[in-house]
Image: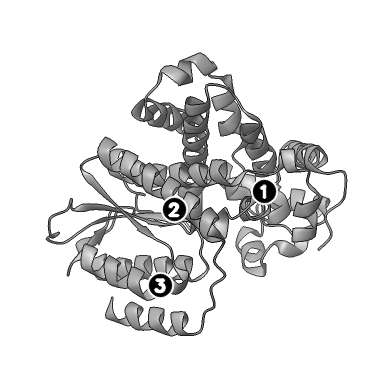
Amino acid sequence: MLFLFTVAMSIAANSQSTPGTDDKSNTLDSLLNEKLEFYRHLYPDISFLILKGGDELVADMMALDLALGHQPSSMDYAHPQKLREDLMLACANRIVYMLQYKMPSASLFKADAPLGWQENLCVLTINPDEIAADSISATRNLLDLPEDFIQKISDDLRLQPTDYLEFVIDHEVYHCLQSMYVGPQTMSQKEFWGDYDSFLNEQGADAYALGMHINTRLEVPSFAKNILRIRGMSLYTADPDHLTCKALQQIFKVPVEDIAEMNAKDIFDTAHQIQERLTISYDEYIQYLASSIQAMKVLGVEDLVSDELRSRIKGVQSDPAQVKELVTNTRRYLSELSCDEIER
């Protein structure tokens, strides 16, 4: 952690922050704090630590170091004790990276001799001003496409800031709850095991976050449908692991009145059941990746696929029917958001 603290200081010294207006920042911060208090009360056996990055990067790493103690361990990944330190270094490096680029993430740790707080520590990296300053930044945070394209999307189809911030918080908290109450990612020698596990977990996280949104609105609002549209365009950003439309559609099938009667733990159980119901085998996931890459080629965004991924997936046959379905659905969601083609 000392090494990472030094790295964080170096990054912070060379970074520039672009905070939002005071009124907007205060509103978003208040919403973030309210949501975290809600989860702290709901799950008293978990401590929730929020890190924002930017100008607060060094202070964030100091707070994380204090909270973790001398010999913490990751609860996200099953691992032998002899690899605890190596895994912790990798996890801490990931947190530094997410803070540096102000990207949302969640990590669950078991703290070593915590000083007055729970040993189960959910670390969230969420910078409200970065991801939800306005509808354009909120939409672009989920749909990583050129700003010119985002600006052409009508305001009623963009993601509204407070709605999106709540969605991100719930989505990331799901990952901690998954590790805590379902279990960590199991160990495997298979090359794409981490990607495979992440793909499955993203289905549950999105289903949970959308379920929580519907639960408080007592309806399926336009925001929910816009989330579906944007997730449906994940191949345009070479992000097949976040193509969660099937999970979102499963939430839409649950009667609104049933979701309204659920508490947050019920919604977590429902989302996890959806995740399990949509679980595919490892081999099916590999073919899905191959089909996604072929679909991206048809969509004209093949250049976004890394050479490394092409090499790793080489020799795996795509499924023509799956490719056709992926292309058709992606183009439909694009047409619903905008009639213009995407220019890069």
Circle number at residue 196: none
Disc 3 designates what residue?
57
Quarter-wise, where is residue 87 in the image? bottom left
Element on which disc 3 rests: helix
Q: Is residue 113 left or right of residue 294?
A: left
From the top left corner, tell me how far across and down residue 31 is, in percent. 44, 46
Quarter-wise, where is residue 106 in the image? bottom left
Q: Amino acid at mark 3?
A: Leu
Q: Earlier in the sequence, mark 2 or mark 1?
A: 2
Q: Is residue 172 left or right of residue 302?
A: left
Q: Quadrant of the C terminus?
A: bottom right
Note whether residue 211 is visible: yes
Q: Earlier in the sequence, mark 3 or mark 1?
A: 3
Note whether residue 82 is visible: no
Q: Give the residue at the far front of this rendering.
A: 23
From the top left corner, tell me how far across and down residue 335 is, in percent. 83, 40
Tell me how far mark 3 sits from mark 2, CA to CA: 17 Å
Residue sitting at x 39%, y 42%: 35
From the top left corner, tell me how far across and down residue 22 is, in percent. 52, 60
Would you say the residues marked 3 and 2 are in contact, meaning their CB atoms lie under 8 Å apart?
A: no
Would you say the residues marked 2 and 1 are in contact, meaning their CB atoms lie under 8 Å apart?
A: no
Disc 1 designates what residue?
234
From the top left corner, tell me how far across and down residue 342 is, in percent. 82, 55
Would you say the residues marked 3 and 1 are in contact, meaning their CB atoms lie under 8 Å apart?
A: no
Q: Nearer the viewer, mark 2 or mark 1?
A: 2
Query: In this figure, what is the number of numbered marks?
Result: 3
Front one among 288 and 153: 153
Q: Is residue 58 above or below residue 330?
A: below
Element on which disc 1 rests: helix
Disc 2 designates what residue?
29
Front one among 322 and 277: 277
Q: Amino acid at mark 2?
A: Asp
